[in-house]
Image: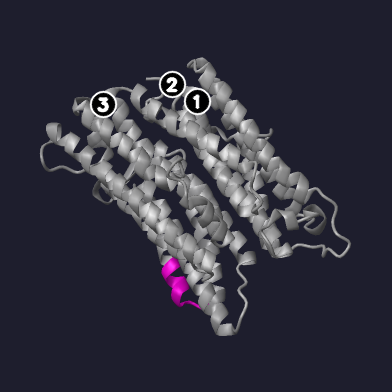
Amino acid sequence: MGWDLVVILVVPAAAGLACWFAPVRLGRALSLASGVATFVLALLLVAAPTTTALGGWLRVDALSVVFLVAVAFLYAATAVFSLGYVRPSGDLDTVARYSRRFFAGLNLFAWSMAMAPLVNGLALLWVAIEVTTVISALLVAIDDTDGATEAAWKYVLIASMGLGIALLATVVMYYAGTSVLGSSYELFYPTLLASAGHFPSEVVRLSFVLAVLGFGTKMGLVPVHTWLPDAHSEAPTPISALLSGALLAVSFYAILRFYQITARAVGPTFPREVLLAFGLASLLLAALYLAAQRDLKRLFAYSSVEHMGVLAIGMSFAAPVAVVGVLLHVLAHAAAKGTAFFGAGSVVRRFGTKDMRRIRGGIGSLPWSGPMLVLAVLGLCAMPPFGIFRSEFLIVSGGLRDPHDAVVAVLLALVLLATLGLTWFSSETMLSASPDEAVRGETSYWIVGAMVMGLAALALLGIHPPGQLSDLLTRAAHELGSGS
């Protein structure tokens, strides 16, 4: 047992290295094969019990599998999308060089994000997330424009400061464990969880606050979110999709690992209150900014901040159903945001701009990806029958059972405000009349295929999640100590 964990790490890493040297067509095919294979292997872990490999350095439980599935699905869908989207202009040598760099980076980025939920321990988790920063920053700047370079530098500076704080959180948690485990031990999850009840409470509280602030920088929580709109807007669209749907989720996973330990050490009340404060601030700011956005990709970037706020607020509720809703939201947001960015890429290809004031008649110009983009936006707005409707319904239900009536009322009001901002985009850009000179037709049917994948997953999660997936979410919520 455990060979599949090793394979999941090896496949995208090998594909990334091969793409650097292989002919462009072979690299594209390898990227697609690697994405699909990684997703299939992740699905095989859904019904599996806790599994370890490499002497315990790799480990998955129900919680880590939830995030691994989100990353692997979006990796597969993005690989499909990239086949139609990545068509750089210039001479043959320039095109080949760009394509090799892009597909190598795409696979290595997916590898680094898959590594985070696979490794066993807080120190290895920090290393994995640091690796995601290095690779993704290079991908943000890959188009070599002034805006992309500036966004990449801003991302590196802010994320590095955040991860410095996260490293301090890891060191402080290690120090907390020395009172029980001695001066030398491994930061493996089972070791920490078994002993957390005897850790000094004030030290653990400090570690958790530092972890939320540090990893919250990569997650996009207010006030440490400021890199996110620029990076999402300037990065190539496939990278924007992975940043939003997968990287933010992986950073949330890191916070949940600290949450597990803190809840056992000091009780769940303190970490829930910390997450509630960050969640409300994130949701409030995102809802206000969404109403004023005119850049298509920045609109979806602030939507990501909104949904990260929803996740943090959901974890502040004690009812187990709310925690199940949070974990389902991770999966549904990956599918919805990936599809939305895919549609945005199609729109930008057709109209040559991200400025929504210059985009009119999207559905008329894009007969397939246009309507699917509107559906993805409705999915982000928690409209039935999509997965985010189900997940937010579970979160609200948990808040009412807790009870947190006032928080639930604020949550619903801010989500409604965010919905108004997103639906304005749909009505003004996609549902308006097409100009007479508009060109009709899709830019690539690979893009259409990727959007079909995302919408199908989003509908499945909303209408009837598979039984094994529902069991996985329940087990993961139990591992988080929901209801304790």
- The residue sitting at 18% across, 35% down in the picture is 177
Q: CA distance from mark 3 to mark 1?
A: 22 Å
- Give residue 265's mark: 3
- The residue sitting at 62% across, 42% down in the picture is 290
Packing grade of label 2 (10 A; few <14, some 14-19, many >=20) is: many
Three-letter amino acid code at the position of disc 1? Ala
- Examine the rendered structure and indicate whether residue 154 appears above or below residue 144: above
**Pointer 3 or 1: first along the chain:** 3
- The residue sitting at 62% across, 77% down in the picture is 89
Residue 21 lies within the magenta run: yes
Q: How far from the left and from the top, in percent, is residue 452?
A: 68, 51
- Is any atom of residue 40 visible in this view? no
Q: Quadrant of residue 410?
A: top right
- The residue sitting at 54% across, 34% down in the picture is 284
Q: Pointer 2 and pointer 1: residues touching (CB < 8 Å)?
A: yes
Majority secondary structure in the magenta region: helix
- Residue to which mark 2 is pinned: 318
Mark 2 secondary-structure assignment: loop
Q: CA distance from mark 2 to mark 1?
A: 7 Å
- Residue to which mark 1 is pinned: 322
The C terminus lies in which quarter of the figure? top left
Mark 1 secondary-structure assignment: helix
Name the one closer to the observer, 179 or 468.
179
User: Which residues are the magenta region?
Assistant: 16-23
Three-letter amino acid code at the position of disc 2? Ala
Q: Quadrant of residue 476?
A: top left
Three-letter amino acid code at the position of disc 3? Ala
- Examine the rendered structure and indicate whether residue 146 appears above or below residue 455: below
